[in-house]
Image: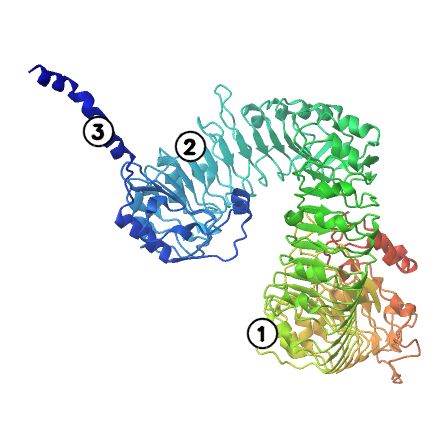
Amino acid sequence: MSNSKLLLSLFPFLFFPFICFASSSSFNTTPKCSPQQTLALLLFKQNLSSMHAPDDLACRHLLGSDYYPVMMNWKKNTDCCKWNGVTCNHNTGDIIGINLSCGMLQGIIHPNTSLFDLPHLQKLNLAYNDFTASQLPPEISRFSNSLTHLNISSCGLVGDIPVEILFLPKLVSLDLSSNNGLKMNPYVLRNLLRNSTHLREVVMAHVDIGWVLPTSLNISSSLKSLDLSWTGLQGKLPDNMFNLPYLEKLDLANNWYLTGPLPNVNKSINIPLKYLGLSSTNLSGDTLDSIGYLTSLKYLDLSSCSLLGAFPKSLFNLTHLTTLNVEGNMLNGTLPSSLFTLPLIEDVVLGFNLFSGGLPSELFKCWSLKQLILRANQLDSEINQASTPLLFIQLINLSLLDLQSNNLRGVWNFETLLSSLPNLTGLDLSYSGLTVLSDDSPTYVNPNFWFLNLASCNLNVFPESLRAMKKLQYLLLYGNNIGGHIPDWVGEIGGNQLIAVDLSNNSITSLPQFQWGGVTQMSIKSNMIQGPFPPSICNMRNLEYLDMSNNSFDGVIPQCFGNMSSLGMIHLGTNLFIGTIPNVCAYNRQLKWLILNGNQFDGEVPIFLSKCRDLEILDLGNNQLYGTFPGWLGDLPGLQVLVLKSNNFHGPIETSSTIKLPFSLLRVLDISHNQFAGHLPGKYFQYFNAMKDAVRMGSTPEYFEFNGKYYSIVVGVKGHQLPFPQLLVDYTILDLSSNKFEGKIPDIVGTLNSLIVLNLSHNNLNGGIPHTLGSLLEIESLDLSWNKLTGEIPQSLADINNLAVLDLSQNHLVGRIPQGTQFNTFEGRSFEGNLGLCGFPLTKHCEHRRSPQLEVTDGDGDEDESGFTWKVVMLGYGCGTLPGFVIAYVMLSTGKPKWLNAIFDAAEHMIQTRKNKIRRRYIFIGK
């Protein structure tokens, strides 16, 4: 009995380990994903594919090099709770989260997608994939009992956001941004912002909500973050926009038609707003005082808001401010010294304003400063070498210094500056007025240094300190005095991190073997480099932009060059290359620009160019090409510029395109100085739609030089070849001069009414000048000289107000010269060589209505071999628009506009009396 009692008393202790073991085993068993939910995911995967070459900068920023197809481990007979991007409830095994962002996915999101068979899903993130042409299905409402977070940004969605988005009452965060084809109607937006009581974050950037009036929005007081940038909003903001009790972030940037004064701020309550983005809006009104009461602000962006006058003092009240951007306004005066006394200020962006004077002393005591961007102002103080390290040594946290495009003076030592700023990772002193010297010795460089622009800083060596910049992405040293051979160690700079290299406009004579496998943009133009094409360039597989123009490269371009599949722009002009044009279209289907002018290429225009379907600019001028006109180029749907000038082409121009509207986008056609014959190609003229009623499309230059939007050519004006750099490509030109065309000028030329330059000179054209040319109301240069034109000058030409250059000389024209605003300004040389003409500006008076009979003379005259001299070259200046129009489309050029003086020095005696009357049409791109 006693033994029984003993056993009973020991029972709990004897069996407790087994109980604990069994209990712990049960807790360690996590439920697996159910077969139904596994099948739903596999069916979803089945309808998608993986992209082969993802190139999304946002994904690279988020994930770095760890960028792979996210569904690669989604396989049958495995637990889906362990799949990439899948989160399960640990207790039930239900799928509660799917994150496939940056997953390299491609396909269509169908209304019956199996994702909707996941009844417990709380978080869905499909951002940064390619679901182009998909619509957000109304079936999204099937998640009404569970979904709290929805992110389908940057996926290519289109169409209207369904009203069913309102049937997600538990939604906390909604991000549909950067789907440029997506629209939201006013009813949906108003109810979303008003009635979603759990909603804390709404991101709609780049979604079209332009027909929504902001004043109609009744925003829920629960909202903490609202991004409506780039949405087309217009009108005034609600009065309570700045007074919402929980709103911490408000981004309304790039809604230019948002107008009116800023909303008032209730000074009696604590406004929690920390982030305010108003860039590129018209919301500033007459005062920014209300912003000064948002004392919790940390980030404020007022860039491109048309702010005028002195820096607004109300911003000095923002003592919590860390980032301020007022770039791109017209603020003037000296730099605001009080700004640099704000205790937490880190990033100051004051570029593209009118600030003058020097750098305030308070700036150099601002220890919290991390980024200082003062580019494109009028700062004009002197900062000499001795004071530079003493000034900057206190800015121990400074990571980016940008003084580009100012009028500063002084000499800075590159190595001293780097060692004084140990956290510096980006430096731009280009066109600042400063001279940068290097003692070519190694020094400390921040290992994360990524951006360097020392353009036009009088640098004369390749600083050895660059060797330590292993993560450099942008190396811009153009417009300096660097000469001789580039050091062999240059390949160590940046490694595979290097993206852009610009060494143009120096005195470099030879190059090392490049080892920059990651470079996408490279310019070595306008140096003194000799020798064959560098074969190491063929190893730069990521290269998209290559400019080697204006050097002395020679020989045949190697075959490996044709294997580069990423090139979008090739500029090899003004070199000494020989042989046939290399096959650059064998593996490349994305080439847009091919510029080979000014070499010694021979043979016919190769038919393989028809495979470059994206070609926009083709310049083969000034070579030794021959054959007939390559009419098949008209099959290229996007061709805008075609230059075949100064070659050995011959024969008539016949329509040989296989498409209905050949050359319909052509804006520039220059086939001058060849041996083309027959009639002018009137059949082609009728297809030149881009030369008819075209709207000029100016664009703003990008910050970096590699933007691919500008192109420079040389066009004949007044019989002389003139280059005009620094101009936008938004002009239309037709130059068929110096050929053997005959017959009449077709009336259809008058329909090309956006032409700026028309040059038909030095041909054998006859008949009268068509009255329809008077419809060319945009024309600024008209040259019909050295033909055999007869009859009178149409009065309609005198009605063209923009006409600045006119040359009708050396024809057989008769009668009275018409009088008109522009014709009254032309000199006699515009009309000389027409014995039957009379009236101003000629000295011959018109005494009779009937014109005298003319003795037909040889149109070639007795001048030089080309048929004209400088006497003819300088004909025809009018006082209308300056023939700066005459054209040049620039790419990658900077430099002060000294070219303008050089071009007109030779003509100074012709235009000095009218110089002040000329209306300039050119647009400067850089300094």
Q: Which residue, given by chain and number where applicable, does mark 2 sit on?
A: 223
Mark 2 nearby-residue class (10 Å; few <14, some 14–19, many ≥20): many
Q: Nearer the viewer, mark 2 or mark 3?
A: 3
Instruction: Identify the residue at the far left of this view.
Output: 1
- Pointer 2 or 3: first along the chain: 3
State which tag comes first along the sequence, 1 or 3. 3
Q: Nearer the viewer, mark 1 or mark 3?
A: 3
Amino acid on which disc 2 is placed: Leu
Question: In the structure shown, which secondary structural element does the residue marked by tag 1 occupy?
Answer: loop
Whether label 1 touches label 2, CB < 8 Å: no
| Badge count | 3
Q: Quadrant of the N terminus?
A: top left
- Label 3 SS: helix
Give the residue type at disc 3: Phe
* Image height of 726 relative to 687, above or below: above
Q: Relative to 778, does residue 145 appear above or below in the rendering?
A: above
Question: Which image quadrant is residue 815 in?
Answer: bottom right
Can residue 355 be seen?
yes
Where residue 508 sits: x, y (%)?
Answer: 82, 54
Q: Earlier in the sequence, mark 1 or mark 2?
A: 2
Where residue 592 appears, as percent x and y from the top left, is 63, 63
Q: Position of residue 71 (x, y in %)?
A: 41, 51
Of residue 638 and residue 422, the one placed in the foreground of this image is: 422
Which residue position is annotated with label 3? 18
Question: Is residue 43 toward the left or the right of residue 730 in the image?
Answer: left
| 3D distance between C-alphas at marks 1 and 2 | 54 Å
Q: Amino acid at mark 1?
A: Leu
- Numbered tag placed on residue 661 in the rendering: 1
Estimate how packed mark 3 is, as few (under 14), some (14 to 19) or many (20 or more) residues with alpha carbons within 10 Å.
few
Disc 2 to disc 3, C-alpha distance: 53 Å
Please name which of the two marks, 1 or 2, marks the residue nearer to the observer.
2
Mark drawn on residue 140:
none
